Image (cartoon, rainbow, N blue to C red):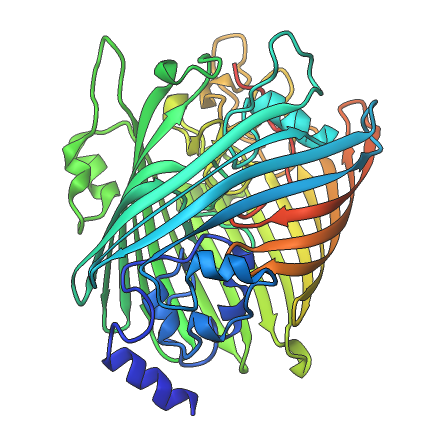
Amino acid sequence: MRRPLLVFAVLVPGMALPQTAWLPLSREVERPYAALIQSVGSPMHSAVRPYARRELSALGLPDSTLLPSALPVLDRWAGVRNGRKVRWGPLLDLQAGFDTDTAAGVVHRAGAGFWFDADLGQRWSVHADAMSWHERLPAYLDSVADAAQTVPGEGISYLPFGADSGAAVAHYDWSGYVSWDPGKYFNLTLGRGKNFFGDGYRSLLLSDEATSYPYLRITTTVWRVKYVNLFASMNDIRGANGVASDFRRKWASMHYLSWNAGKRINVALFEAIVWSQGDSLYPRGFDMNYLNPIIFYRPVEYNLGSPDNALLGGSFSIKAGKRTLLYGQVVLDEFLLKEVRAGNGWFGNKQAAQLGLVARDAFGRKGLMLRAEWNAVRPFMYTHSDTRQNYAHFGQPLAHPFGSNFQEVLAQAELTQDRWLFSARASMAWLGRDAEYSYGNNIFRPESDRQSNSIGQFRNYGFAIGSVNEYTVLHAEARAGWLIDGSTGTRLEASALYRTAGLADGGSRQAVVVRVGVACYFRDRHAEQEPRYVLN
């Protein structure tokens, strides 16, 4: 029955959901669709997020079939199930608990905000959401916020005047867009928010780890091909002390070309270029050469003699069985085959790789999701000789939160039954730690900080994942929650987190964090973090 529904929905666009609206970039909100998105024969390009609502309707699971809100008034406000063209609702985040690694012991998270959607005819839609928090962070996240000057993924961390580290911080983030379908195959979206390329829990291409940013996204979908042109304005916040006018502007231009080669196979190519706006001596601004939507940027760089930071990558996914997906990514920052073959740990061998497996409705159990994933990033990956052009925004990496010089394995299990969610996730990472000189873990440190000899020759070899001071981070978290509102990913939830991390003196630091309350996942949370650098 699903196949005729799928074909019918594709042939008759505009039949169910707003044509130009996008689902929030949230795995909690996406969960009801996830199994169908990765099913055999699905026309979706699962690695391109956020997802378009019109594509979701083609899967035969319109919003009207989803669980209604436990609070009927939210459904009346949201209008998701009654066809209203204007929809809105509140966002609420209210949790409290304790952290064994803090002197006070007590932690809390209090946040509030709103979201708004409107359909302007068949081709236009607008969206806005905003949220602010007052939060006493667990000690390990507080260390990250102190080092990066930013709460992971959620904006600048503002301390009360004169407060010491460990005090409650205030932070906020907002996003919005105007989306337009000029024709059957194209979409233009101008907004502020986040994007994600990949099928994994992590992405080594582009993730949602960093704070929201302004962007223009052009999406072309023809036959089995989806092509995304993404142009973004980002900021280097070092030295600005949270003053927006002192942020240093940088730009990013990215392409993601995805091809569903068959019912079970997807392959994709990725490229990105990052450049700074320059300074008073060399003002540059936006480089119009990078507006070309077709050509590859690396050849353009060579043609222009450009010093900009370029990344090339690719990804794949293979559907095995009915609901199992094998996926992977490879990213190249610099690559010389002879140096790779030599195996001498040349500092310029900047590569990253991911391999993972995710099973939906695993072992025939509806609602059971299992995931295993491996990520490895070599030293100096995502860095640049001009640190203003590194692959980061607002003090956070644009790919993996650990930056570079690490490898990680993670396992995840989730069971959904009606409104209940039971989740467990654990990750182990092996990381290198810089000493006096750079060994490639700090993406905000230039490559020229490598050790040199008495005549000024840099050390070029002997760099491997984990060098120079290897340590481990174990992060395990369990959650149990009852769904209040699926359209915003809001749950009544209890969670427990255990974390241990190696210290510079060879010891370790452990923490247990327990929290309970109302948790809003309208934006994905970013719990696995580690301070890898201190912004100047």
Q: Residue furthest bottom?
A: 1
Q: Can residue 200 be spotted in the picture?
A: no
At 27% across and 67% down in the image, what residue appears? 225
Q: Is residue 482 above or below residue 454?
A: below
Question: Is 84 situated above or below 214?
Answer: below
Left/right placement of residue 504 relative to residue 56 reads right
Please report the residue visible at 84 percent of the width from the left and 28 percent of the height from the top: 507
Q: Quadrant of residue 265?
A: bottom left
Where residue 82 appears, as percent x and y from the top left, is: 40, 68
Q: 236 and 419: which one is in front?
A: 419
Give the camera-side residue of 146 and 164.
164
Residue 42, percent across and down?
Answer: 40, 77
User: 521 or 204: nearer the eye?
Assistant: 521
Residue 148 at x, y = what percent?
56, 24
Q: Where the N terminus falls, by quadrant?
A: bottom left
Residue 48: x %, y % from top left: 39, 58
In the image, is residue 409 above or below residue 350?
Answer: below
Q: How many marks?
A: 0
Q: Taking 89 as reference, is 116 left or right?
A: left
- Regarding residue 438, the answer to whether it shows in the image is yes
Along the viewing direction, whichever of 13 and 295 lies nearer the viewer? 13
Residue at 58% across, 20% down: 534
